Image (cartoon, rainbow, N blue to C red):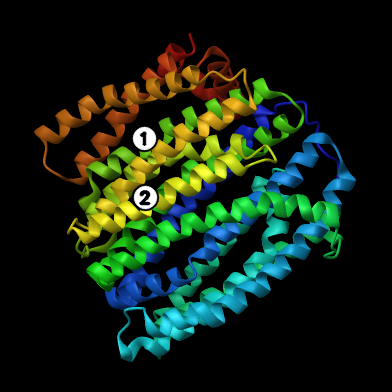
């Protein structure tokens, strides 16, 4: 496998990868909304909430997998940026060795501490405990298998094969769609049947993904092996990464448990419903940033720090603006969106959704700043800042619940925490790259916020003059996009970014440049 030239910033590749991932997100949105509605209707609110809260017992796995995937991808991409193919092979075999050990630890933890918590502390009705145990065991072994898949997924991301990544994800969604159809016709305990079939889909996709990687990438043909120096480097980095992920778990999964304690399983169902829409929406921003991430790490490895920060700023601007077009209509018309999707909207779902979307929009800033900070191998300082922010946020949420605050306040606290975390991480980047000017970054973000504020004016007028309806939702989406796009083009994007967008349009859909609005903005 030929290693790409690390000194070149391939904006065409970034655009192509972003396109694949956005298409994936669009399909995820359609399939995810449909499947979630059917699952909720078939399982009912109680079982839907039970599935969410039992899964949260091992919520550590989702963050751990993300942390491990980020660590593996960072090291493999970094060596790719330096052009060292042999180092990439050593890294893969060492990371696979580490993941097998972690998978074993997950099983041990899940069958001891986690199982005790399920049996003795979780608020589950006695007649549903059998289903809860079944879901929990599938979560334990599914999570352990998922950990062993991390190095393979990291290789796909490092080679920027986003079309393959998106293709596997779409196939997984289609199979889960078939699972949703299957639970509507099977008998017995539908929650157990649904969880078992989803587990089977996950195992099938793991085998398929691994077979592709072994066939296409030479690194993936190496067996797990202990390399002392490589393992020491990975553990040095991964240890801090896992520590930060653990603190994230304490905050987010702890919040789920506190909501269960203070407000009951119905509130957990409302959180799960809102989180589904929030997660689908945030996929667009995450995928745009994922398209930039390998290039950022490669440029840092090659020593091209001006390109590093240019790509990071471009990613943050594009993500904030594109996500605003999606998030604002959903926040304004949250009752209508949830009502159309679910029919009967559980209590607190609207409040949860609005707060989650607002907080999630702010994470677009923090996430890509993290990419730059974690490109360096020494990540102790940003990790300590991150841990302090999330643990403090957990304590604040606990205090708010204890004094009688409503459940949705937790997600307002999350948004405030991401602002503080972004400011702390910027100070770390300043140490890494002394030539970086925080004022320039703040100016870019401030311009995005100003453009957003101006574009909200016609939205407020529409909401004042019209009642909630699908017509108003469509009008808000069109008017807001029609306001923010030209303003961002004029005042947020720089000449190089405008030229790149116009070049992409001329290559992919040349007829658009003949349309009158595009004639105006291309001047």
Q: Is residue 22 visible?
A: no
Residue 142 at what x, y percent from top left?
58, 73
425 and 151: which one is in front?
Answer: 425
Q: Residue at x 41, y 58 (%)?
A: 252
Label 2 crowding class (10 Å Cα cut-off): few <14, some 14-19, many 20+? many
Label 2: which secondary element: helix
Quarter-wise, where is residue 329 in the image?
A: top left
Residue 275 at what x, y percent from top left?
37, 57
Q: Residue at x 31, y 65 (%)?
A: 258
Give the residue pinned by disc 1: 325
Number of numbered discs visible in the structure rendering: 2
Give the residue pinned by disc 2: 393
Quarter-wise, where is residue 461 in the image?
A: top left
Judge from the rendering whether residue 137 lies leftward or rightward of residue 292; answer left or right. Answer: left
Kindly report which numbered mark, 2 or 1, lies closer to the viewer in this rendering.
Answer: 2
Q: Earlier in the sequence, mark 2 or mark 1?
A: 1
């Amino acid at each position: 496998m030929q290693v790409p030239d690390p000194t070149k910033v391939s904006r065409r590749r970034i655009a192509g990868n972003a396109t694949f991932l956005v298409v994936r997100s669009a399909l995820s949105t359609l399939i995810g909304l449909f499947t979630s509605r059917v699952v909720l209707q078939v399982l009912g609110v109680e079982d839907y909430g039970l599935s969410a809260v039992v899964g949260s017992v091992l919520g550590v796995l989702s963050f751990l997998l993300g942390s491990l995937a980020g660590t593996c991808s960072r090291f493999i991409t970094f060596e790719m940026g330096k052009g060292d193919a042999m180092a990439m092979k050593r890294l893969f075999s060492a990371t696979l060795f580490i993941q097998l050990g972690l998978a074993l630890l997950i099983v041990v933890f899940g069958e001891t501490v986690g199982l005790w918590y399920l049996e003795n502390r979780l608020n589950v009705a006695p007649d549903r405990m059998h289903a809860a145990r079944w879901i929990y065991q599938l979560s334990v072994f599914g999570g352990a298998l998922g950990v062993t898949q991390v190095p393979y997924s990291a290789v796909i991301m490092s080679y920027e094969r986003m079309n393959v990544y998106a293709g596997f994800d779409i196939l997984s969604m289609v199979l889960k769609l078939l699972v949703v159809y299957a639970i509507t016709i099977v008998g017995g305990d539908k929650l157990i049947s649904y969880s078992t079939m989803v587990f089977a889909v996950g195992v099938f996709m793991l085998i398929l993904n691994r077979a592709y990687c072994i066939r296409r990438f030479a690194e993936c043909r190496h067996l797990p092996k202990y390399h002392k120096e490589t393992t020491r480097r990975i553990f040095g980095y991964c240890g801090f990464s896992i520590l930060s992920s653990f603190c994230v778990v304490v905050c987010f999964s702890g919040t789920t448990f506190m909501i269960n304690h203070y407000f009951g399983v119905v509130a957990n169902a409302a959180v799960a419903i809102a989180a589904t829409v929030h997660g689908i929406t945030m996929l667009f921003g995450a995928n745009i940033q994922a398209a930039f991430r390998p290039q950022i790490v490669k440029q840092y490895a090659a020593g091209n720090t001006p390109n590093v920060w240019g790509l990071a700023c471009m990613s943050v601007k594009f993500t904030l603006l594109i996500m605003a077009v999606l998030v604002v209509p959903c926040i304004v018309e949250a009752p209508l969106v949830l009502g159309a999707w679910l029919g009967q909207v559980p209590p607190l779902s609207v409040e949860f959704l609005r707060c989650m979307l607002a907080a999630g929009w702010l994470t677009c800033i923090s996430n890509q700043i993290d990419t730059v900070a974690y490109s360096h191998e020494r990540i102790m300082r940003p990790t300590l800042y991150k841990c302090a922010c999330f643990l403090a946020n957990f304590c604040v949420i606990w205090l708010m619940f204890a004094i009688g605050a409503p459940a949705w306040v937790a997600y307002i606290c999350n948004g405030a925490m991401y602002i503080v975390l972004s400011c702390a991480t910027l100070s770390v980047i300043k140490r890494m790259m002394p030539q970086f000017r925080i004022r320039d970054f703040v100016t870019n973000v401030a311009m995005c916020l100003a453009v957003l504020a101006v574009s909200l004016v016609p939205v407020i007028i529409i909401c004042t003059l019209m009642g909630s309806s699908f017509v108003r939702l469509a009008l808000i989406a069109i008017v807001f996009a029609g306001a923010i796009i030209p303003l961002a083009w004029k005042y947020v994007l720089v000449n190089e970014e405008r030229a790149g967008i116009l070049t992409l349009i001329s290559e992919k859909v040349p007829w658009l440049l003949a349309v009158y609005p595009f004639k105006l903005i291309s001047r």
